[in-house]
Image: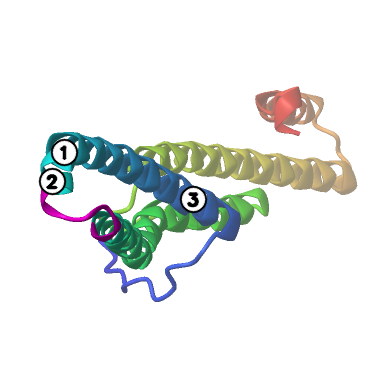
Amino acid sequence: MKKFRRRTRLFITGRFQIRYISLILFFMFMTAVLAGYTVYVTTWVMFGEKLAAVYPQGLLLDIVKQVNMVLFLRLILLSPLVIFIGLVLSNRIAGPIYRIQKFLQKVSNGRYKNDLELREKDELQDLAGSLNLLVSKLRSERQGREKTLDAVKRDMGELETAVMEGGHDGKRLLEKIVELRENIDKFSVHDL
């Protein structure tokens, strides 16, 4: 099994990763807002009247503003961490997508020699396995066609030799023509 180096670039496929990170950030902010709102409202409903009796109203408003500012700053300070985590997680999908695209480009150019290999923790392992199976079948079909084509070329050469030598042995020529036709019939219309 091939040993992989660590990916050095976390940002591989821009649009995909930006959308992925944006979704993570959106759900993080929505969860934070919902959780914060729930805790915030519950706390102020339960303690608001008691605190209003202890603190003057102006001081209570300052405390509320400070709490709001601290919550907002913590949310902003956590954003880079969430972006980094999103980038690392999206890389496990974006990296394989990038490799699969490169692999399919090679296959479309007729290069079937190597299998697609992904890193152990990458996603899309099942897709890579299916693509490898497909390429393996294409590889064996191609080898079969090449063998058949070689046989056709060989038979054509023998026919040419027999015709050029003269002394046409009709039976031998007929056998070669039948062999040639059988080999040609192995190629179906969609193989060409």
Pinpoint residue 42: horizontal percent, then vertical percent. Answer: 19, 35
Mark 2 surroundings within 10 Å by alpha-carbon count, few (fewer than 14), some (14 through 19), many (20 or more): few
Left or right, 10 with reference to 174:
left
The residue located at (30%, 39%) in the rendering is 37
Label 3: element kind:
helix
Pinpoint residue 13: horizontal percent, then vertical percent. Answer: 55, 59
Label 2: element kind:
helix
Q: Which of 44 and 55 lies nearest the eye of the viewer? A: 55
Pinpoint residue 84: horizontal percent, then vertical percent. Answer: 36, 65
The residue located at (18%, 46%) in the rendering is 52
Q: CA distance from mark 3 to mark 1?
A: 40 Å
The residue located at (33%, 62%) in the rendering is 69
Q: Is residue 135 above or below residue 60?
A: above
Q: Amino acid at mark 3?
A: Ser
Q: Which of 152 and 169 lies nearest the eye of the viewer? A: 152
> Which mark is drawn over residue 49?
1
Work out whether mark 3 precedes mark 1 in sequence or the reverse, and give the earlier one.
3
Magenta segment includes 57: yes
**Overall secondary structure of the magenta stretch?**
helix
Q: Is residue 126 above or below residue 179?
A: below
Q: Which residues are magenta?
A: 53-59
Q: Dots 2 and 1: beta carbons under 8 Å? A: yes
Res. 126 image quadrant: top left
Magenta segment includes 60: no
Mark nearest the camera among 3 and 1 is 1
**Which residue, given by chain and number where applicable, does mark 3 sit on?**
22
**Which residue, given by chain and number where applicable, does mark 2 sit on?**
53
Can you see residue 124? no
